[in-house]
Image: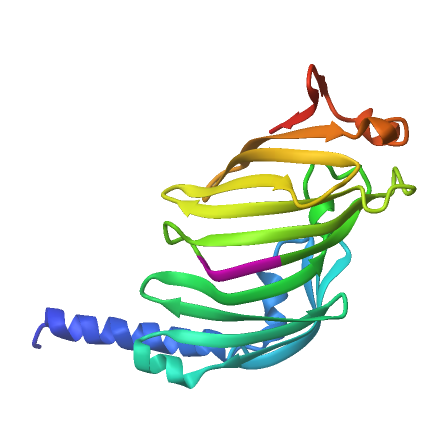
């Protein structure tokens, strides 16, 4: 019996890889909930990973996106990539992005996505009990682990159920930039607000986020902000959250 050559072994491995990929892509998209964290869920998903839709995407019991649709883009194969066009809705806004899978890894391109903030804040232990909510818009030409990839997140407005009389409580702009071992982030005010928020830090690809956020309340409304400020460590210059 002749031995299997190195070339034949590679062919069999490549064929097996293609078969596995096709098997996964032909799976009903409803099966994706098996792979998601317990606080994330896709509702009423139909179709396959190639082409499908879902009525909603939720986080911590809050709907982040509605009327999700994705469609495979065959032309991307000419450049050695797999790509999908994504569409969804949130807060009366049409959202879109392009998902690309290639030799360089996974990336999102032409990102313009608006979403509610309540579920996001609930998932952050340091502020989960503050009753925070609001609206955010994420924009990025190319969002990936590639060094230098950047994104901007505009949070406008941000409010708290602890101080319902102040609306908005603040507006923020967050800048993200991919580095070798994670993402650096920086937060700054995006306009006049009851609390000026500044901060910076880093999110490791494998590990937790680290950083410092400083809160400087407007003296005119400090009394109204008391229910919220009581939960934040005070410093000589204001209030500070470290994690």
Q: Nearer the viewer, residue 55 or 194?
A: 194
Vertical comparison of 193 with 106: above or below: above
Vertical comparison of 87 with 146: above or below: below
Kindly tell me whether residue 195 is visible in this rendering.
yes
Residue 40 percent coordinates (x, y): 67, 57
Q: Please state the total of marks drawn on the protein image.
A: 0
Residue 140 belongs to magenta span: yes
Majority SS type along the magenta span: strand
Q: Which residues are magenta?
A: 138-143
User: Is 106 positioned to the left or the right of 9 in the image?
Assistant: right
The residue shown at (42%, 62%) is: 106
- Tell me the quarter of the image containing the C terminus: top right
Residue 26 percent coordinates (x, y): 50, 80
User: Is 71 positioned to the left or the right of 89 in the image?
Assistant: left
Q: Nearer the viewer, residue 198 or 61?
A: 198
Vertical comparison of 191 with 143: above or below: above
**Could you say which quadrant of the image residue 104 lies in?**
bottom left
- Tell me the quarter of the image containing the N terminus: bottom left
Task: Check the image and name the residue furthest to the top.
Answer: 236
The residue shown at (88%, 38%) is: 163
The residue shown at (55%, 39%) is: 186
The residue shown at (60%, 70%) is: 31
Residue 142 belongs to magenta span: yes
Residue 225 percent coordinates (x, y): 85, 31
Kindly tell me whether residue 4 is visible in this rendering.
no
Q: Identify the image's colour scheme: rainbow, by chain, secondary structure or one colour.
A: rainbow
Task: Check the image and name the residue furthest to the bottom.
Answer: 74
Residue 97 percent coordinates (x, y): 54, 69
**Could you say which quadrant of the image residue 149 lies in?**
bottom left
């Amino acid at each position: 019996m002749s031995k299997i050559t190195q070339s034949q072994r590679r062919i069999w491995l490549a064929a097996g890889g293609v078969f596995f990929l096709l098997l996964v892509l032909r799976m009903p998209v409803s099966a994706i909930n098996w792979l998601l964290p317990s606080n994330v869920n896709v509702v009423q998903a139909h179709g396959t990973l190639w082409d499908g839709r879902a009525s909603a995407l939720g986080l911590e019991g809050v709907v982040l996106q509605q009327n999700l649709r994705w469609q495979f883009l065959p032309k991307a194969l000419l450049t050695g990539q797999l790509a999908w066009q994504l569409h969804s809705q949130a807060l009366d806004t049409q959202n879109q992005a392009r998902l690309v899978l290639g030799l360089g890894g996974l990336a999102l391109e032409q990102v313009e996505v608006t979403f509610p903030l309540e579920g996001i804040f609930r998932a952050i232990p340091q502020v989960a009990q503050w009753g925070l909510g609001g609206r955010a818009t994420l924009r990025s030409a190319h969002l990936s682990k590639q060094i230098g990839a950047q994104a901007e997140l505009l949070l406008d407005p941000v409010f708290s159920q602890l101080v319902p009389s102040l609306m908005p409580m603040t507006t923020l702009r967050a800048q993200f930039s991919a580095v070798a071992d994670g993402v650096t982030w920086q937060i700054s005010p995006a306009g006049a607000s009851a609390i000026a928020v500044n901060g910076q830090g880093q999110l490791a690809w494998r590990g937790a986020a680290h950083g410092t956020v400083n809160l400087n309340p407007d003296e005119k409304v400090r009394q109204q902000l008391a229910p919220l400020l009581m939960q934040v460590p005070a410093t000589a210059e204001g209030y500070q959250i470290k994690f």
